Structure formats: structure tokens, C-alpha cells
Amino acid sequence: MKRITQSVCIALFAVVASQARALDKTHQGFQEREQEQEQEQRQVQTINLRFEIKQGRSAIEVKPLHAEVGQFGLSRSLPDSAALEKLHVVVKNRRGDRIHTVALQNHLQRHVETFDPQTGAIEISEMRTQPSAMLDVVVPFGSDVASVEIVADSKMAGAPMQSLQVQAPLPLLTLDRKQIQGMAKRAAQERGTLAPAPLAATPTLTTILNNGTTASKMDFVFIGDGYTAAEMSKWRSDAQQVIDAFKADPLLAANLGKINIHRVDIASNQSGVDQPDYGIYVDTAMDGAFNCANIARLLCVDDNKVISIVSKVLPADGREEIVVISNSTRYGGSGGAVAAVSMASSSKEIALHEIGHSAFYLADEYDYGTCDLSREPTAGDVSLYGTRSNSKWGDLISASTPVPTPLGAYANGTVGIFQGGNYCTSGVYRPTENSRMRALGNPWHAVNTRLANKVFAAYSGSSGNGGWVTQTGNLVAGASAKAPNTSPNYVQSGAGTIGLKLTGAAGTNFNLYLYQWNGSAWAQVASATTTSSTETLNYAGTAAYYYVEVRSASGSGSYTLQYYFPPK
């Protein structure tokens, strides 16, 4: 009996130990899955939101337009030095705590300026309120995000996160997580069901200079307006002229490693640009028009249409600076949410000046306009302080340069403290006699170059990758992901060799599939399906629409996909 009891105890102990090991494995499996889910959440943790904003009777009205979840780089918040009216996008968790805030420009308030094409001097400088504008932002969207608010309050700019817990203004709009997820789901369904439209109505993308991911570079986008389908060759030639002029600018040339340059092609129904002062009206993709706001040389486009078109071919973090090129040789241009220029030879200078505002947060250094001496300007190139010791750029002033600095006594570009700037003839000082921010056709000079380089310092400076694009993500067993993973989830490729390189986590079996649009449906045209965690695929393709699918045959983990499509 004692021997039987001992045997039973041993057997029971073995069963319990086995169950314990099984529980341990189950618990370990849960932990691993939780870690995988956390990693997936970290990988896909941002969302692109777009809103239309209008000036209502008593407050700004905000209408949500679009939501797309992805792995976009977060929108960069305007610095305190940006002398712009701001809107704030505030992300809250379930407890109502603010976990992220980003300040963006309120483009309803538009600074309008025109320049003399002969001298480059300012002609008109004034503020105008637009009937509507677009707010385009990328914010975190992890599992802890419960709501997103739009707040208009310039006093919040630059405040520490903890100070935002008190006396917060009422939001203009609040979207809870369920509402945001609903918007994103509807947008994803629309992208999944829409086939590529005919070329004449579809924007197509060509990356002229590819130095890395859109999240890590400052992306310049050039898009044409008023070019018909029959004028696409002319458009590409015009675009290259403008792009070459930008690349030749010394400041941009010195930072080309931190820049991507994209060209977006879209055909307009008619050629040219509206010229209401001459009774000329044409049907173009972005409604380009001279005589905007009854100012002859002010060339405007519909910013909302521009951003909507560009967003179809570039992700939210790939369109920081958009330049619309209108099919006209009449002189003019404008700045704001997007810059607009014509093909007049000196119009390109307008775009560079406007980029000084939108990309580098520089102030106007001319002395025409509405002067405000009530407070120190936030921009780094103008100041109320006229002594060497308290100047923002005092370290760049030579000991032999007198302060204040007389006009006409030193070579242009000499750093000093010159009277006049920021729309004031006196009481405000600028660093050089004439820079691009005072009159077109001048260099940036040392102070503005240093301020611009501070902006570029936030971007990666790695060298180009020959047109290859890198996409990363996570897959669980049996799941798949598309590339590109941003709208419209396919690319238009030229004829040539398509290259795909996939690296999966160790122990996984991830495969590659290439699909082509045959005119009525998507068809698989190539695949790489070894049992390894890495795959390489080269496919000699015709000019067509394509997308890539990464699929997990077994295993879960991260992947890195590099893909190349020949330019059209």
C-alpha cells in the first residue's frame, strides 16, 4: 500500500509539474504576445488628421475631413520664434491629461506681400483673412489616446506640458477616440475600394531627390497648375527649371543631404491661369488666379485643393513645403500654407522669400507695413534692442563694426545693427543692410543662414539612397501589410526593373508578392516565397500601377522592406 501511495504521489506530482510548465508556457506566450502588441502599437502610433477651418461669427469653426493611421513622423511644432497666429492640437488620455501638444499656423490669417520685379523691393504688405483654410497634422495615436482637441490660444505656445493643466481655453473641436477611428476606417475603406483613376485626373509622383524617409527629411513638393495632359512635357521642363534654381541657392545647396524633392504631376482641363483683371478665366486643377484680393501681382491657388491632391501621393510627413507652379509667364506669386509662383524669371525669388517665413520662421526685414513696437519680436532676425550686448546676433558682429550701423558704409552682408525692419521704419533693427527677407534677389546672409541651419539640424543628414524607399512594420502569423502603406497604397511606375528587399525578424517566414493593375483588377505578377526571413525580388516591369504585399507565412515580428520603382 505504501509503495502504491508513493507511486500515485509521484504520478500526481508529475501531472502537476507538467500543468505548471504548461501554465508557465501559456503565461510566457501571453507575455510575448503582449510585448508584440505593445511593439506593434509603438510602430503604428500616429495618425494624420485634416480639418477645414473657417472664421465664424464669434469663433473659428473646425470641420474634420480626413483621418489616416500610419507610421508618419509627428508634425513639428512651431517654435516660439515663429511670429504667427497659432492653433494648437491637444492630445489627451482617458484621465483627461494632455499627453501631446503641437502648435500649427492658423492659415486663416494670411500675410499678403508683393514685390517690384525690377528692384525686388516690397510693394504691398498687409494681413488678410481668408474664408477658409486647411489644418493638416500628425499626432500620436497610441492605445492611451482618448481624444484630440483643436484649441485657439496663442498664450499656450511654448508653455511647459504640466502648466497646460490649468486655465485651458475651451476647445474649438473635440474628437473622441471612437469618432477618430470611425473616420480612419471610412478613409481606409475608400482607399481599398477605389481603383486607380485615369491618368489625366490622377496625381502622380516623381521623387527628384531622395535622401531618405519622409519623416527624417525636409520634403519640398513642386506641383503644376494649368498644364493640360498635352502639356505634361512642358510641365516637367518648367518644374526642372524651378527645382534647379532651388538647388542652386547656397543655403539649400549646403543642406541638400537633409532634403527630399518631389514633383507631382496632375493635368488641368485647360491651360494657363485666371486673370480676372483681363477677363481671362480657365479651368485648372488648383484654381490658380492672378489679381487675388484685387492685387494684380498676387497669384493665389486653392490651398485646400492643393493639399488634398498632394496627400494622395505623399504621406503626411512628406509635404512640409509645397510650391505650386502656374503655367504663366506673368510675374507674381504668394506664400502661406503653400507657395505659388509663375514661370516669370524672377518669380522664383518670391518662393525663396516665402520659404524663409514658412520653413525657417524668419521675419520680414523691410520697413513697410503695420508697425508694432509693443513687444520684442519672436523671430530671430529682427529686434527692438539696438545695442551689441543685448542683440540676438551680437556674437556675429565684428568689433570694428559700429552699432547702430550706418547704411551704405559697409559691404552688403556685413553683420551689424541696422535701423528698420518688421514693418517699422525705426525702433526695430535688422542684422544686415539687405537680405532676401528685405528685398528679393539678395543673399540670406549669416544671421538668417544660422537660423535656417538650426531648423535643418532637426532633420537627418544621411546621404541619398538612389531612389529606394524604406518601410517598416510588424506582422503576426498569417497577417499581411501593403507597400506603400500610405494613401493611395499603390505607385505609378515607369518601365524597368522593380527592386524589392525584405528582412524579417529572426525565426520568421515572411514572403513578398508584387501586384499590377491590369486595367480592371489587381493581378499578382511576381513573388519571393522561400522559407527564410529574408527575400529579394527583381522584376522587369512595364509602365503601370503596382503595389507590394508583405505576408507572414509563419512567425511574428518586425520587418523592413526596401522597394524601388523606376520613375515614370
Image (cartoon, rainbow, N blue to C red):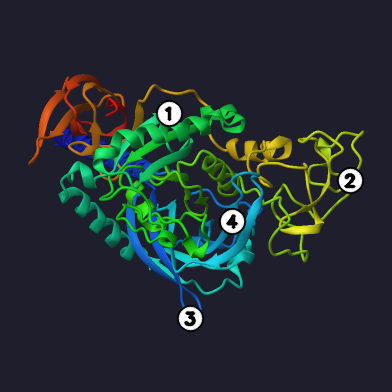
Contact between labelled residues 3 and 4, with CB atoms less than 8 Å apart: no
Contact between labelled residues 1 and 4, with CB atoms less than 8 Å apart: no
Amino acid type for the residue under numbered disc 4:
Glu
Q: Position of residue 556 (x, y in %)?
A: 26, 34
Q: Secondary structure at mark 2?
A: loop
Q: Say which residue label 4 marks.
A: 113
**Residue at image point 32% right, 37% down:** 205
Q: Say which residue label 3 marks.
A: 57
Q: Position of residue 115 (x, y in %)?
A: 60, 51
First in sequence: mark 4 vs mark 1 = 4
Q: Position of residue 354 (x, y in %)?
A: 56, 48
First in sequence: mark 1 vs mark 3 = 3
Q: Secondary structure at mark 1?
A: strand
First in sequence: mark 4 vs mark 3 = 3
Q: Say which residue label 2 marks.
A: 389
**Foreground of the two, 337 or 344:** 344
Which is closer to the viewer, label 4 or label 1? 4
Which is closer to the viewer, label 4 or label 2? 4
Task: Pick out the residue farthest to the left.
Answer: 520
Mark 3 surroundings within 10 Å by alpha-carbon count, few (fewer than 14), some (14 through 19), many (20 or more):
few
